[in-house]
Image: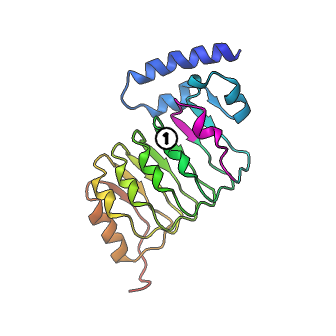
Amino acid sequence: MRLILALLGTFFFTQLCAQDYNLEALESDIYQYTSLEEALAAPKDSVYSLKLKDRLKEVPMEVFTEFPNLQLLDLSKNRLTEIPPQIGLLKKLKKLILFKNKIEVLPAQIGELEDLRELVINQNELETLPDEIGNLKKLRYIDMWSNNITRLPGSMAEMWGLEEIDLRVIVMTEAEQAEIKNLLPNTKVELDQHCNCGN
Protein backbone atom coordinates (compact mmCIF):
# COMPACT_ATOMS: atom_id res chain seq x y z
CA MET A 1 0.00 0.00 0.00
CA ARG A 2 2.80 2.40 0.90
CA LEU A 3 4.50 1.61 -2.43
CA ILE A 4 1.30 2.49 -4.30
CA LEU A 5 0.98 5.73 -2.35
CA ALA A 6 4.60 6.58 -3.05
CA LEU A 7 4.13 5.94 -6.79
CA LEU A 8 0.99 8.06 -6.84
CA GLY A 9 2.78 10.77 -4.93
CA THR A 10 5.63 10.71 -7.46
CA PHE A 11 3.16 11.00 -10.35
CA PHE A 12 1.31 13.93 -8.82
CA PHE A 13 4.57 15.58 -7.82
CA THR A 14 5.80 15.38 -11.41
CA GLN A 15 2.61 17.09 -12.52
CA LEU A 16 3.01 19.66 -9.77
CA CYS A 17 6.54 20.53 -10.80
CA ALA A 18 5.28 21.32 -14.28
CA GLN A 19 3.51 24.29 -12.70
CA ASP A 20 5.37 27.16 -11.09
CA TYR A 21 2.98 27.62 -8.21
CA ASN A 22 0.03 25.46 -7.26
CA LEU A 23 -0.35 25.02 -3.53
CA GLU A 24 -3.93 23.89 -3.99
CA ALA A 25 -2.69 20.83 -5.89
CA LEU A 26 -0.02 20.26 -3.27
CA GLU A 27 -2.62 20.18 -0.51
CA SER A 28 -5.31 18.19 -2.31
CA ASP A 29 -3.52 15.81 -4.68
CA ILE A 30 -0.37 14.85 -2.78
CA TYR A 31 -0.62 12.24 -0.04
CA GLN A 32 -0.31 13.94 3.33
CA TYR A 33 1.50 12.04 6.05
CA THR A 34 -0.05 12.65 9.46
CA SER A 35 2.41 10.83 11.67
CA LEU A 36 6.17 10.91 11.80
CA GLU A 37 6.36 7.12 12.05
CA GLU A 38 4.38 6.68 8.85
CA ALA A 39 6.50 9.24 7.01
CA LEU A 40 9.76 7.64 8.17
CA ALA A 41 8.54 4.24 6.94
CA ALA A 42 8.03 5.62 3.42
CA PRO A 43 10.80 6.27 0.88
CA LYS A 44 12.37 9.57 1.97
CA ASP A 45 12.04 11.17 -1.45
CA SER A 46 8.29 10.46 -1.56
CA VAL A 47 7.32 12.63 1.42
CA TYR A 48 6.11 16.00 0.13
CA SER A 49 3.48 16.89 2.73
CA LEU A 50 3.66 16.36 6.49
CA LYS A 51 1.04 17.32 9.06
CA LEU A 52 1.87 16.69 12.73
CA LYS A 53 -0.72 17.54 15.37
CA ASP A 54 0.24 15.55 18.45
CA ARG A 55 0.34 18.35 21.02
CA LEU A 56 4.04 18.61 20.32
CA LYS A 57 6.20 20.72 22.61
CA GLU A 58 9.16 20.55 20.23
CA VAL A 59 9.66 19.62 16.60
CA PRO A 60 11.36 16.24 16.05
CA MET A 61 14.70 16.73 14.28
CA GLU A 62 13.78 14.08 11.70
CA VAL A 63 11.29 16.55 10.23
CA PHE A 64 14.23 18.67 9.06
CA THR A 65 16.75 15.99 8.16
CA GLU A 66 14.87 13.05 6.64
CA PHE A 67 12.57 14.50 3.96
CA PRO A 68 14.54 16.32 1.24
CA ASN A 69 11.46 16.93 -0.95
CA LEU A 70 9.17 18.27 1.77
CA GLN A 71 7.06 21.11 0.38
CA LEU A 72 4.25 21.50 2.92
CA LEU A 73 4.80 21.35 6.68
CA ASP A 74 1.84 21.77 9.01
CA LEU A 75 2.69 22.02 12.72
CA SER A 76 -0.44 23.90 13.74
CA LYS A 77 -2.39 23.37 16.96
CA ASN A 78 0.54 22.09 18.99
CA ARG A 79 2.34 23.49 22.03
CA LEU A 80 5.46 24.77 20.35
CA THR A 81 7.24 27.75 21.88
CA GLU A 82 10.01 27.89 19.28
CA ILE A 83 11.04 26.68 15.86
CA PRO A 84 14.61 25.35 15.72
CA PRO A 85 17.16 26.85 13.32
CA GLN A 86 17.19 23.56 11.38
CA ILE A 87 14.04 24.82 9.65
CA GLY A 88 16.46 26.37 7.16
CA LEU A 89 17.31 22.89 5.86
CA LEU A 90 13.91 22.54 4.15
CA LYS A 91 15.01 24.18 0.91
CA LYS A 92 11.99 22.98 -1.11
CA LEU A 93 9.34 24.05 1.38
CA LYS A 94 6.52 26.02 -0.23
CA LYS A 95 4.07 26.34 2.66
CA LEU A 96 4.75 26.49 6.40
CA ILE A 97 1.77 26.36 8.79
CA LEU A 98 2.44 27.14 12.45
CA PHE A 99 -0.80 28.68 13.67
CA LYS A 100 -2.22 28.18 17.16
CA ASN A 101 0.98 27.46 19.03
CA LYS A 102 2.87 29.53 21.63
CA ILE A 103 5.79 30.56 19.45
CA GLU A 104 7.56 33.67 20.75
CA VAL A 105 10.23 34.08 18.10
CA LEU A 106 11.09 32.79 14.63
CA PRO A 107 14.72 31.84 13.92
CA ALA A 108 16.81 33.84 11.46
CA GLN A 109 17.15 30.65 9.40
CA ILE A 110 13.57 31.02 8.21
CA GLY A 111 15.07 33.40 5.68
CA GLU A 112 16.79 30.39 4.06
CA LEU A 113 13.47 28.94 2.83
CA GLU A 114 14.05 30.34 -0.64
CA ASP A 115 11.03 28.66 -2.25
CA LEU A 116 8.49 29.50 0.48
CA ARG A 117 5.22 30.92 -0.91
CA GLU A 118 2.91 30.93 2.15
CA LEU A 119 3.65 31.45 5.83
CA VAL A 120 0.84 30.92 8.35
CA ILE A 121 1.84 32.00 11.87
CA ASN A 122 -1.37 33.42 13.32
CA GLN A 123 -2.43 32.86 16.94
CA ASN A 124 1.04 32.74 18.43
CA GLU A 125 2.94 35.05 20.79
CA LEU A 126 5.26 36.72 18.30
CA GLU A 127 6.35 40.30 18.96
CA THR A 128 8.84 40.67 16.12
CA LEU A 129 9.97 39.00 12.92
CA PRO A 130 13.63 38.39 12.07
CA ASP A 131 15.25 40.74 9.53
CA GLU A 132 16.11 37.69 7.45
CA ILE A 133 12.45 37.26 6.50
CA GLY A 134 13.15 39.83 3.81
CA ASN A 135 15.14 37.14 1.97
CA LEU A 136 11.92 35.30 1.11
CA LYS A 137 11.53 36.80 -2.37
CA LYS A 138 8.94 34.23 -3.49
CA LEU A 139 6.69 34.64 -0.45
CA ARG A 140 3.22 35.73 -1.54
CA TYR A 141 1.10 35.50 1.59
CA ILE A 142 1.70 35.86 5.33
CA ASP A 143 -1.02 35.23 7.88
CA MET A 144 0.02 36.56 11.28
CA TRP A 145 -3.20 37.81 12.84
CA SER A 146 -3.60 37.61 16.61
CA ASN A 147 0.04 38.07 17.54
CA ASN A 148 1.73 41.00 19.28
CA ILE A 149 3.53 42.34 16.22
CA THR A 150 3.17 46.10 15.69
CA ARG A 151 6.24 46.75 13.54
CA LEU A 152 7.71 44.86 10.58
CA PRO A 153 11.40 44.63 9.63
CA GLY A 154 12.50 47.14 7.00
CA SER A 155 13.87 44.23 4.97
CA MET A 156 10.31 43.28 4.06
CA ALA A 157 10.22 46.23 1.66
CA GLU A 158 12.36 44.05 -0.64
CA MET A 159 9.79 41.22 -0.76
CA TRP A 160 8.62 42.07 -4.27
CA GLY A 161 6.33 39.05 -4.56
CA LEU A 162 4.36 39.67 -1.34
CA GLU A 163 0.71 40.03 -2.33
CA GLU A 164 -1.12 39.92 1.01
CA ILE A 165 -0.42 40.10 4.71
CA ASP A 166 -3.03 39.59 7.44
CA LEU A 167 -2.44 41.63 10.60
CA ARG A 168 -5.93 41.61 12.04
CA VAL A 169 -6.64 41.16 15.77
CA ILE A 170 -3.50 43.13 16.60
CA VAL A 171 -3.80 46.35 18.59
CA MET A 172 -1.96 49.12 16.73
CA THR A 173 -1.92 52.88 16.70
CA GLU A 174 -2.73 54.82 13.56
CA ALA A 175 0.96 55.66 13.18
CA GLU A 176 1.99 52.02 13.41
CA GLN A 177 -0.55 51.02 10.77
CA ALA A 178 0.59 53.84 8.49
CA GLU A 179 4.22 52.75 8.86
CA ILE A 180 3.35 49.21 7.75
CA LYS A 181 1.33 50.43 4.76
CA ASN A 182 4.19 52.70 3.70
CA LEU A 183 6.64 49.83 4.02
CA LEU A 184 4.48 47.58 1.80
CA PRO A 185 2.76 49.92 -0.68
CA ASN A 186 2.07 47.19 -3.25
CA THR A 187 0.82 44.60 -0.76
CA LYS A 188 -2.75 44.13 0.44
CA VAL A 189 -2.51 44.74 4.19
CA GLU A 190 -5.43 43.57 6.31
CA LEU A 191 -5.75 45.52 9.56
CA ASP A 192 -8.38 46.11 12.20
CA GLN A 193 -9.46 49.65 13.07
CA HIS A 194 -6.57 51.42 14.74
CA CYS A 195 -6.64 52.53 18.36
CA ASN A 196 -5.62 55.84 19.89
CA CYS A 197 -3.49 54.08 22.48
CA GLY A 198 -0.05 55.61 22.95
CA ASN A 199 -0.87 58.71 20.87
Identified at 47% across, 50% down, the residue is 110
For the point 31% across and 54% down, the residue is 187
Magenta highlight on residue 191: no
Magenta span contains residue 65: yes
Can residue 18 be seen in this snapshot?
yes
- Front residue (pair 90, 15): 90
Give the residue drawn at x 28%, y 54%.
Answer: 158
x%, y% of residue 128?
Answer: 46, 66
Where residue 165 sits, quadrant-wise, is bottom left
Quadrant of the drawing holding the C terminus: bottom left
Q: Which residue is mark 1?
A: 95
Q: Secondary structure at mark 1?
A: strand
Image side of residue 136 versus residue 168, left or right? left
- Image quarter of residue 161: top left
Q: Which residues are magenta?
A: 58-73
Look at the magenta stretch and give its main secondary structure.
Answer: loop
Q: Position of residue 24 (x, y in %)?
A: 48, 32
Most extreme residue toward the bottom is: 199
- Please indicate whether residue 84 sits to the left or right of residue 184 in the image: right
Instruction: Report how many numbered discs are placed on residues in the image.
Output: 1
The answer to whether residue 35 of the structure is visible from this angle is no
Could you say where residue 79 lies in the image, as x and y percent from the top left? 69, 56
Q: Nearer the viewer, residue 174 or 138?
A: 138
The quarter of the picture where the N terminus appears is top right
- The amino acid type, in three-letter code, at marker 1 is Lys
Identify the coloring.
rainbow
Q: Is residue 103 above or below residue 22?
A: below
Q: Residues within 10 Å of mark 1 (few under 14, many from 20)?
A: many
Residue at 50%, 30% (x, y): give it.
26
